[in-house]
Amino acid sequence: MLRSSFLPALLVCATAAICPSVASAQLKVGVINMQRAILDTAEIKKASTEMQAKFKARTDQLESLRSELGAIQAKLQNPQTPPAQQADLQGQGTLKQRQAQRIQEDLQADVERERNETLQKAAARMADIVKKMAEEKSLDMVVDITNAVYFKPALDVTEEAIAAYDKAFPAK
């Protein structure tokens, strides 16, 4: 039993003694803030602006319904509102609340779907850019900043990755 665990350890030590260049080779590492690298690209900034414009009509409609609901609520809280009108207002409020909820859910789902599609596409492109950049700089590894406990600022390649992405995929 002792012999079976001793042999692999002996082989590792022997390899390190025979090939000191392998044991002492320096690893070249880069660090990237992948989230920032993706979100700071011109393409994502443009897509964000376009999404806001695309969904503005529904956002405005939702805000209008919320404003109407506020007005109905104020009338319902007014003690001078007749009981017959209160019943009518409660019905209107319920209807508008359902409309607002439907619009909110649909809008949220559409925004989330489009945002995820855009970010996934950009993340795949950024990964390719980082791989290419790592090869050009002879980096052995690029680590996301979220996984690094400490690193020297000189190892950060985030800005270079953003510039390379914007050059490869200019915002149209």
Image: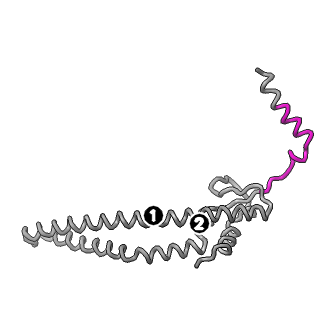
Q: Position of residue 138 (x, y in %)?
A: 80, 60
* Mark 1 burial class by Cα count in 10 Å: few <14, some 14-19, many 20+: few
Total tally of numbered discs in the picture:
2
Q: Amino acid at mark 1?
A: Glu
What mark, if any, has residue 112 been given in the picture?
A: 1
Name the quadrant containing residue 89: bottom left
Q: Residue 19 lies in magenta, yes or no?
A: yes
Residue at image point 81% right, 31% down: 8
Kindly state the secondary structure of the residue where label 1 is placed: helix
Which residues lie in the magenta part? 9-28
Classify residue 69 as left or right of residue 36.
Answer: left
What mark, if any, has residue 122 been given in the picture?
A: 2
Separation of marks 2 and 1 at Cα, in angstroms: 15 Å
Kindly state the secondary structure of the residue where label 2 is placed: helix
Q: Most extreme residue toward the top, as rendered?
A: 1
Q: Are marks 2 and 1 in contact (CB under 8 Å)?
A: no
